Amino acid sequence: MIVFFEPWEYNEIKNGELAMQLTVLPELETLINKRLSSGGYANVEDVLRRALVSQDAEESRTDEERRALSAHIDEGYLQAERGELIDDAQARREIQAMKDDWRLYR
């Protein structure tokens, strides 16, 4: 598989712009194709961009954010052990409400 991506090393022209040419191992090609077949990605460049943005976000988390996330996970685990669970319909309603609030205050 050959992937066109920019802007680091330029050795090809794509749509009139210089682009990077990458060769990927079969295992990575399989993962890329899996993402493409899901329908959630427009093209190979979209798969790579979203993967790199996600990795960048993960790597840029501060130690404080990591500790807060870990504490949140621990809290959820303890709640589950105590039987303080909600069903999937309730979880979906709560998540949707959080998304609605987030959109309202952006």
Image: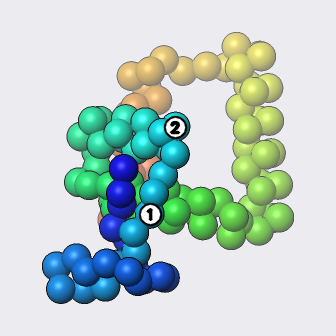
Residue that mark 1 sits on:
22
Q: Amino acid at mark 1?
A: Leu
Residue located beneath label 2 in the image: 27
Q: Amino acid at mark 2?
A: Glu
Which sits in the foreground, 28 or 57? 28
Residue 88 placement (x, y as % from top left): 44, 21
Q: Secondary structure at mark 1?
A: strand
The answer to which of marks 2 and 1 sits earlier in the sequence is 1
Q: Disc 2 and disc 1: Cα gap in Å?
A: 14 Å
Furthest residue toward front: 11
Q: Toward which corner of the image does residue 62 lie, by quadrant? A: bottom right
Q: Nearer the viewer, residue 22 or 72?
A: 22
| Quadrant of the drawing holding the C terminus | bottom left
**Could you tell me which secondary element the residue under label 2 belongs to?**
helix
Residue shown at the point (60%, 67%) measured from the top left: 56
**Residue at image location 52% in from the left, 63% down from the top:** 52
Q: In this view of the protein, which residue sits in the foreground, 38 or 96? A: 38
User: Which of the labelled discs sits on residue 82, or is there none?
Assistant: none
